[in-house]
Amino acid sequence: MTQDYTEENNSQIFAKEKSNSRENQTQLPNVPPLTAQSINRVREGLAAAVDPAVRQQIAKTLQQLTDMTSQYPEPRVNPGVRRLVLRSLIHTFFQVQVEYLERFPQQPAILAVNHLHHIDPFLLLSEIPTAPYYYILGDARTLYNKWWKRFILGFAGGVIPLERMWKEEFAVIAEAKAGRKELLELATEIEQNVPKGTDIQTLRQIDRIVLTILTRGDGIVLFPEGRLGETEGNLHLPLKRGTVIYALKSGVPIVPVALIGTHNLYLRKKFTIRFGQPLYFAQNPIPKRQEVEQVLLKLQSEMQALLPTDYQEPTGPKLLCNFLNHLFW
């Protein structure tokens, strides 16, 4: 995977912060408790981070998107073909119900969607209209960690890969600093191979790409929770401000969207995509914090109103549950 590091070397890297590691853990973003399952997810994520095929696809896509901001056209497939390919994939395994599609605007917009599973962007692109053309801003490794994802998304386009460290990876680093020696090697490899995604250059690059897309008349799908939700019918709060800032700067509406049923996958499970009324705001190239907060609260209220208040997971056999959850991981 990467160069081998001895426990002694790892210990030296983390020794300086070991004494106050519990305090440092509280400063990390949404650090969850570590479980065997989450540690296994971290190992799989690290494997994706150092996979040459994943790295190559991320670099190629970002370069094409950066060129787009300099007036060079970005290669992308016909949106009808993209939708057909993804719909064929999704409908092979699942049932999909779309509600209030008539609310979908013909003009460019930002779709603000709750996030329950890595299938969510594929599900949305398989059902939304083909015009305007919509991009997905999503985690780079979960978009490209499978060969079939790289094949489809590399062919279809419309993806903005965001390189960032996962909450589980922050947790591994925090626990390693707290003295869990069995996690030292893993934590070291994470810090050496996984970009945090918080440096100014990366953030400015993403901002330029998103605003260019909206300015030229395309739309974008964002997940303002900034991470996967844990239960059906609930948002992970507070929402990230980026969705609102992009909408105010560009002057495009925000369409709240609810995804229902995607937290756990199995054969023939029914998903619901529920569209809300578009939210319109006056364009403001330099929005103030108070304005952003007010719009964010409005968006939060509208998104929550679309979600079920008493969701019940269907009973009965859940065929291919493990296979499908891992396939779309």
Image (tube, rainbow, N blue to C red):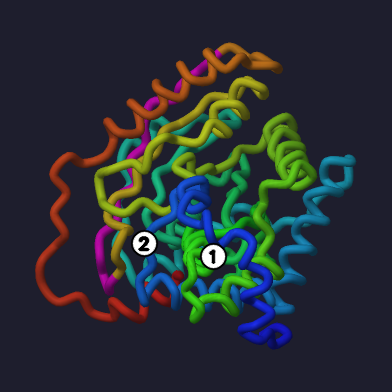
Question: In terms of sequence position, does the residue under pointer 1 or pointer 2 come before the other?
Answer: 2
Quadrant of residue 218 within the rendered picture: top right
Marks 1/2: CA distance?
14 Å
Q: Find disc 2 in the rendering and name its residue.
A: 33
Q: How crowded is mark 1: few (under 14 residues within 10 Å), some or many (20 or more)?
A: many
Q: Position of residue 294 (x, y in %)?
A: 45, 16
Q: In which quarter of the image is the C terminus?
A: bottom left
Residue stretch rendered in magenta on the structure: 266-281
The answer to whether residue 147 is seen in the rendering is no
Q: What residue is at 38 percent from the left and 29 percent from the top?
A: 300
Q: What residue is at 56 percent from the left and 76 percent from the top?
A: 184
Q: In this view, does 20 lie above or below 302?
A: below
* Mark 2: secondary structure: loop
| In magenta segment, residue 269 | yes
Tag on residue 46?
none
Q: Find disc 1 in the rendering and name its residue.
A: 177
Q: As drawn, is 321 to the left or to the right of 317?
A: right
Task: Give the main secondary structure of the magenta stretch.
Answer: loop
Q: As drawn, is 277 to the left or to the right of 306?
A: right
Q: As drawn, is 135 to the left or to the right of 269?
A: right
Q: Where is residue 206 in the image (x, y as percent from the top left)?
A: 71, 43
